[in-house]
Image (cartoon, rainbow, N blue to C red):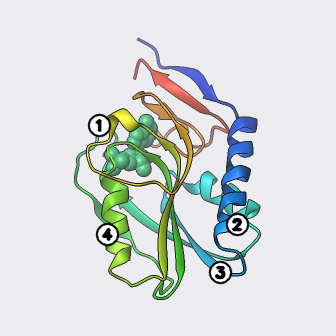
Amino acid sequence: MAETLDLLLDNATITAKIAELAREIESDYENESVVLVCILKGSIHFLSDLARHVRLDTRIDFIQASSYHDSKTSSGVVQIRKDLDINIEGQNVIICEDIVDTGTTINYLRSLLETRNPKTLRVAALLSKPSAHVVENSIDYLGFEIENEFVVGYGLDYAERYRNLPYIAILRGA
Ligand code: IMP
């Protein structure tokens, strides 16, 4: 069966939601600075759009964790492939995650960054699949709740493809 893409969220819808999340973040951190942490690679577009909408003193850093290996199911094991450059001690940190599926990755990263004594540590996630969560997790700034479908685009990949799409689609037939 050939791969097909069914549009789930178009670019205008995503952009409008990210602008809303940015307003929430601005009101929570008024007159403070924030460090936005992009989880590579899937969160690149989310981070980039969010950072451009947030009117605060903002720094950006990158961390890479992997739990998926060219497949549609999680291995359940999180590895750090690239760590932060910024010392986050005493900083307001917001981890930006593309999608919370089982919740394993974000839980692991939250615990890891918590050990570095940030002033505050919150999570922004563009997408969440509540029915797939297997670990308790809290998302402070959430874009969209979606069904338990495999989605691609807007940074999300299937075997490194589709990250460039400006919209989010359900991948079928892969
Ligand atoms: P979790 O650790 O199970 O929550 O998985 C989080 C990571 O798995 C995300 O950051 C994505 O990289 C990847 N992932 C989970 N669901 C999807 C999906 O539907 N499409 C593409 N990647 C996904």
Q: Which of the two discs, 4 and 1, sits closer to the camera?
A: 4
- As measured in the structure, the alpha-carbon distance from the residue carrying label 2 to the one carrying label 4 is 25 Å
Task: Look at 31% across and 69% down and name the residue there.
Answer: 111
> CA gap, disc 2 to disc 1?
37 Å
> In this orientation, which residue lies closer to the viewer: 91 or 167?
91
Q: How many marks?
A: 4
Label 1 residue near ligand 1, CB within 8 Å: no
Residue bearing the label numbered 4: 111
Horizontally, residue 77 falls left or right of residue 107, namely: left
Judge the density around disc 4: few (<14), some (14-19), many (≥20) Cα neighbours within 10 Å: few
Estimate the x, y position of residue 71 in percent, counting from the top left.
32, 37
Residue that carries the numbered disc 2 in the rendered image: 27
Q: Amino acid at mark 2?
A: Ser
Q: How far is mark 1 from mark 3, CA to CA?
A: 37 Å
Helix, strand or loop at label 1? It is: loop
Confirm or deny contact between disc 1 and disc 3 (CB under 8 A): no
N-terminal label among 1 and 3: 3
Which residue is found at the position 42% from the left and 27% from the top? 149
User: Which is nearer the N-term, disc 4 or disc 1?
Assistant: 1
15 and 154: which one is in front?
15
The location of residue 151, given as percent across then percent down, is: 48, 32
The residue beneath circle 3 is 33
- Considering only vertical position in the picture, is 128 above or below 59? above
Depth check, mark 3 against mark 2: the one in front is: 2
The location of residue 93, given as percent across then percent down, is 52, 74
Amino acid type of the residue tagged 1 in the rendering: Thr
Q: CA distance from mark 4 to mark 3?
A: 22 Å
Dot 2 falls on a residue whose secondary structure is helix
Does label 2 or label 4 sit earlier along the sequence? 2
Left or right: 109 in relation to 58: left
